[in-house]
Image: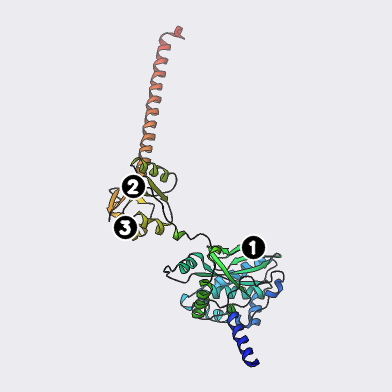
Amino acid sequence: MCRWMMLMLLWSASCLAGEPVFDAIDYQSPQKYLGIPDSVGNQSQIVAQARKLKADQDQQTVANVLDWMNSNLKCQTDLAYNWRNYDTVIRDGCYGSCADYAIVCGALLRGAGIPAVWVKTMDVSWIQDFKQGRPFQSWSGHVFLEIYLDKKWVLLDPGARQLYPRYSTGARILPGNRFAYHKGNDPRAMVMSLQWEEWKQQTRDYFTQLDLSLLPVDVKSRVSLRSANSKGKECYVIGNSPYYQRMTKMAREQGFHYIQSFNSGFDQYLPRARGRSLYIETHDGQPLVKQEVLEKYFPGAFSGVEKGQIKVDGTHIIFVDFSKEKVSEAESEKTLKQRVQILEEQVKVLQEQLKVLLKKDPDAR
């Protein structure tokens, strides 16, 4: 009986070991996060390389580590699906993803005397798609590091070479709208995306149970409200300031009740513009939106740039070319200069006539 219970306890412990934990780090004891786990790589080799990169200031040491990695490692994405530690990455001279890149960076920082913690995140948009049963193209996550600099914990994105000094270790939403859900001392024990199938199962299990209240508002679930009067009178405007304001005014004058302006998020707004009117800021025959982006949703739309408008599958696209206004302004300026020149010539003539009159009749002074 005791033996059976012992086996059950061991089995339970092994199951729990792989469960993501967010709040297991002892931030009051940074020295706990200096050791280099065997799974990360050869400790003596890591420390030897780290010493070469160590500077007088810890922040410079971090910069040196990132510089060295950038100079010596190349990205090879087909290597992202098998476990790779410091030894493997350095031997091959390449990394597969943010996971093994962060493993190498964390190992070198620890070897240089800077405490480091690995932080696993998943993109908020991916989590919401997963939770709502919406299809997704890839498993989108990222690995950050928490490092101890100048007597405080800060956030480091090794791949982006970005350091965030104003950082709270309790933050769940990290740069890039990523949700932090697992922090640890040993990357392999945490289960990284390099352990592909195991990681997917762990991720699936964890986020199936996640409380959605921990996440920002799900923007993909929003419902756009329209009044009955706006039906069929919707217009979308692509433009920068001050041109989008002028196109918005033009659209209102044309009787459009609902007008949505944007200059980014094309994959979000262009599908909504289908079957409606679309005004596009244009200069010298060059629309603000790139051809491949626009024609992804409206094939052949750019053939209407020269004429200024085109209809594509029920969508009326108007290319508003503001360069014509510049020409008008230039012409106005030219006309003004000509008028000034004529006036100056007339003044000269009057001055000459006055001189002649004064010579004939000096008393006229």
Observer-nearest residue: 168 or 155?
168
Residue at 69 percent of width and 71 percent of height:
26
> Which of the marked residues, 3 or 2, is nearer the chain's N terminus?
2
Mark 1 residue element: loop
The tag on residue 168 is 1
Give the quarter of the figure containing the N terminus: bottom right
> Which of the marked residues, 1 or 2, is nearer the chain's N terminus?
1
Observer-nearest residue: 149 or 46?
149
Q: Which residue is mark 3?
A: 298
* 196 to the left or right of 329: right
Q: CA distance from mark 3 to mark 2?
A: 19 Å
Residue at 60 percent of width and 83 percent of height:
12
Q: Quadrant of residue 120?
A: bottom right
Q: CA distance from mark 3 to mark 1?
A: 45 Å
Q: Amino acid at mark 3?
A: Phe
Residue 144, image x, y percentages: 58, 69
Q: Which residue is mark 2?
A: 233
Image vertical order of residue 92 relative to residue 173, above or below: below
Q: Amino acid at mark 1?
A: Ser
Residue 356, image x, y percentages: 40, 14
Question: Number of numbered discs present?
Answer: 3
The tag on residue 259 is none
Kindly report which numbered mark, 1 or 2, lies closer to the viewer in this rendering: 2
* 66 to the left or right of 290: right
Observer-nearest residue: 312 or 26?
26
Q: Quadrant of residue 213?
A: bottom right
Q: CA distance from mark 1 to mark 2?
A: 47 Å
Mark 2 residue element: loop
Q: Amino acid at mark 2?
A: Lys
CA neighbours of label 1 inside 10 A, class few (<14), some (14 to 19), many (20+): few
Image vertical order of residue 170 relative to residue 113, above or below: above
Kindly report which numbered mark, 3 or 1, lies closer to the viewer in this rendering: 1
